Amino acid sequence: MAAGSKEQPGTRPRMSVDLRGIGVTLAGRAVLRDVTARLAEGRIGIVGRNGSGKTTLARVIAGLIVPDAGDARTFGIDMAKDRRAALKDVGIIFQNPDHQIIFPTVIEEIAFGLAQQGLRQSQAEAEAQQMLVRFGKAHWADAATHSLSQGQKQLLCLMSVLAMRPGVIVMDEPFSGLDIPTRLQLMRYLDGIAAQVVLVTHDPAQVRGFDRILWLEGGRLIADGPPAQVLPAFEAQMLDWGGMDDLAHLAH
Ligand SMILES: Nc1ncnc2c1ncn2[C@@H]1O[C@H](COP(=O)(O)OP(=O)(O)OP(=O)(O)O)[C@@H](O)[C@H]1O
């Protein structure tokens, strides 16, 4: 684990996810409504209840969903229209690593994205091996991906995305299957990377040290600000709703 291997802050790219009036309707239901935010900070947390629209917003940012209303740009580019730019500039880590991993061995999985970016296979595998070394997992190279635990698969997804050096990494509940030491190691590692991180979570503890928090409720942005301002209100509201017996307050 190379938690100490911080990249130079100066290498951090100019970052900007620009969301203007984003609306998404799925199966006839408004899932996101008029979400506007310009995200220039290095660490952004998106919090909200089940069904509040967090994953949908993460997918819009990554260019995987075209909004029905509004405009979404990352580094000035509409990632939904320019998949080549999206592949280069935006990394996404899904909630379920089984939806992401496609290759039989670890080294092939990490090398794939690098080859897609234009590296020769031998070069891609050499860089993939370096990424494994960085995480103290050189011995995983030939391991069968299906034999990894859920947490190990999440780590593999993270290494695959980091290897491609995206400007923005969008992570949807990336720590859900991880034990505490692995989660802490990964969070420490994330602290040191140059890319902008947009992290979706239910758990305020995971984003307390972040620069900015977006709170979604019913597809709307109901709070947007520093963690010290947004998270206490979010936690109080969650406890309040959690204490109610009226299930109508649960997400749809
Ligand atoms: N493909 C789809 N078709 C229809 N409805 C969808 C689709 N995807 C999501 N939804 C609905 O949109 C709403 C928001 O879903 P989303 O996954 O964005 O929420 P979330 O905040 O990430 O939830 P969770 O915390 O449970 O992962 C939910 O009510 C969900 O049922």
Image: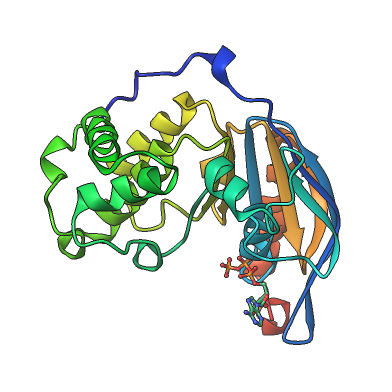
Q: Which corner quadrant holds the C terminus?
A: bottom right
- Dividing the picture into quadrants, the one containing residue 246 is bottom right
Ligand 1 visible in quadrant: bottom right
Identify the residue shown where x is 72% and y is 58%. Answer: 237
250 or 170: which is nearer to us? 170
Instruction: Name the residue at 24% across, 51% down.
Output: 108
Residue 205 visible in the current orientation: no
Residue at the bottom extreme, as displayed: 28
Q: Nearer the viewer, residue 221 or 23?
A: 23
**In the rendered view, does 212 fall on the left or right side of 105?**
right
Image height check: is 51 above or below 117? below
Viewed as shown, does residue 222 lie left or right of 77?
right
Image position of 68 with respect to 58: above or below: below
* Location of residue 151 in the rendering, given as x and y in whole percent from the top left corner: 29, 54
Color scheme of the displayed model: rainbow
Asked if residue 181 is positioned above or below residue 79 in the image, the reply reads above
Asked if residue 84 lies left or right of residue 53, the reply is left
Q: Residue at x 14, y 45 (%)?
A: 140
- In the rendered image, the quadrant that contains the N terminus is top left
Percent x, y of residue 161: 42, 44
- Residue depicted at 49% across the width and 13% down the height: 8
Q: Position of residue 152 (x, y in %)?
A: 25, 52
Q: Is residue 16 visible?
A: yes
Q: Position of residue 196 (x, y in %)?
A: 59, 34
